[in-house]
Amino acid sequence: MQLQFFVRSPTHQTLTVTLEPTQSLTLRHLKSSLLPNPRSVSSFYFSLNGKPLSDSTLLPNPQITQLSTLFLLPRICGGGGDGGATGAESRDCYLKMYADKKPDKIDPNEKRLGKWLNCALSYEPLREPCVIDKLGNIFNKESLVEALLGKKLPKEFRHIRGLKDMINIKLSMIPGKESEAADGATFQCPITGLEFNGKYKFFALRNCGHVFSAKALKEVKSSACLVCHKEFVESDKMVVNGSEEEVAALRERMEGEKVKAGKEKKKRGIDVVDGKDCGKLEGNEKLENGKKSSNGGVKKFRAMDVAPANATKEVYASIFTSSRKSDFKETYMCRSLPLGRN
Ligand SMILES: [Zn+2]
């Protein structure tokens, strides 16, 4: 008896397949006879009553009864096999899915507070002894000195070269706030009791190191420190953790002081050369003195000038490498430097 069944193609056409009783073939054969492009055979599969059939299923088959309908369906390729991916997603969407969440923008409030409660360098909670630099940054002295000695100061603090660039400050502890772990401010203004927490402006006095709120200095008009009574002038007041403009002003002042100090040093240096050493620049002592004070603006030492009597000056001078401008040139192929120079 002939076996007759239907095949529903992917394009929703229904084909009738008739199989002679003597005929026997696999679904793979059937598939390739139905599809115009043999290469696409693996892209389709047969399904019966919603269940996929293996390509090697042999016809006739007890499963495929008279007048049943097989569906020829395209395989959906790609994806992760978990049903979640269809392969149609763009790469972008995976990148988004697995991308690390960007850290939240730093709350400027928190950043500001951090500067008042923690060392500007180590970010550890402030604990005495503390120092400020000439820009009003506040540090734990221990951390700063350690970094300075280890030459580990970050670029922003390179203006601190030594102890002379730090000002020891004396902070007033809030009573009962001895423990480091406590949240919030540890220090306060000794006069007004305002907390050292970033909400109020504070000044450190350069000469004695005591730290006051701006309010205290404003209310108590005094030219002496409110704690130790040491006299101070307006320029001794250093704003702590100041605004951008205040820091810029401090920086300007710091640079100014540096230039001034440099000039004074230079002046002293020149005095020494003029007064003492240069008087002896005569005869054979020239060599010695020339060496000693070559930085002080003294005439450069020339071997020719001190050649022994009866010596040919040029020959004597040729002993010294610097007497003659070198003809040797370095090329891209070799380093031909005169003896003693390479
Ligand atoms: Zn003081």
Image: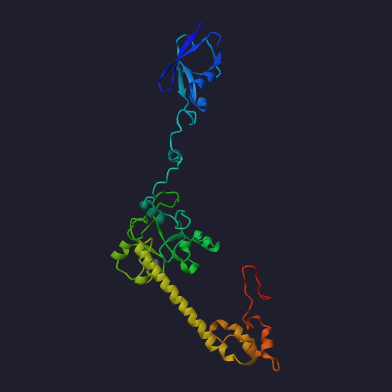
Of residues 95 and 40, which is closer to you in this image? 40
Observer-nearest residue: 279 or 130? 279
Give x and y (percent) for residue 289: 61, 86
Specify the farthest residue to the right. 310
**Front-lying residue, 244 or 71:** 71
Q: How many marks?
A: 0
The reply to whether residue 307 is visible in this rendering is no
Q: Is residue 155 left or right of residue 191?
A: right
Quadrant showing the C terminus = bottom right
The spot of residue 225 in percent (x, y) is 36, 68
The answer to whether residue 267 is above or below residue 336 is: below
* Residue 9 visible, this angle: yes
Q: How is the image coloured?
A: rainbow
Residue at the spot x=46%, y=79% of the render? 264
Most extreme residue toward the bottom is 310
Apparent side of residue 49 relative to residue 321 in the rendered image (left or right): left
Q: Quadrant of ligand 1?
A: bottom left
Q: Observer-nearest residue: 217 or 49?
A: 49
The quadrant where residue 320 appears: bottom right
Q: Position of residue 143 (x, y in %)?
A: 50, 59
Farthest top residue in view: 1
Residue at the left extreme of this rendering: 219
Above or below: residue 288 compared with residue 146 = below
Residue 55 % position (x, y)? 54, 20
Q: Is residue 195 above or below residue 289?
A: above
Image check: 288 left or right of 35? right
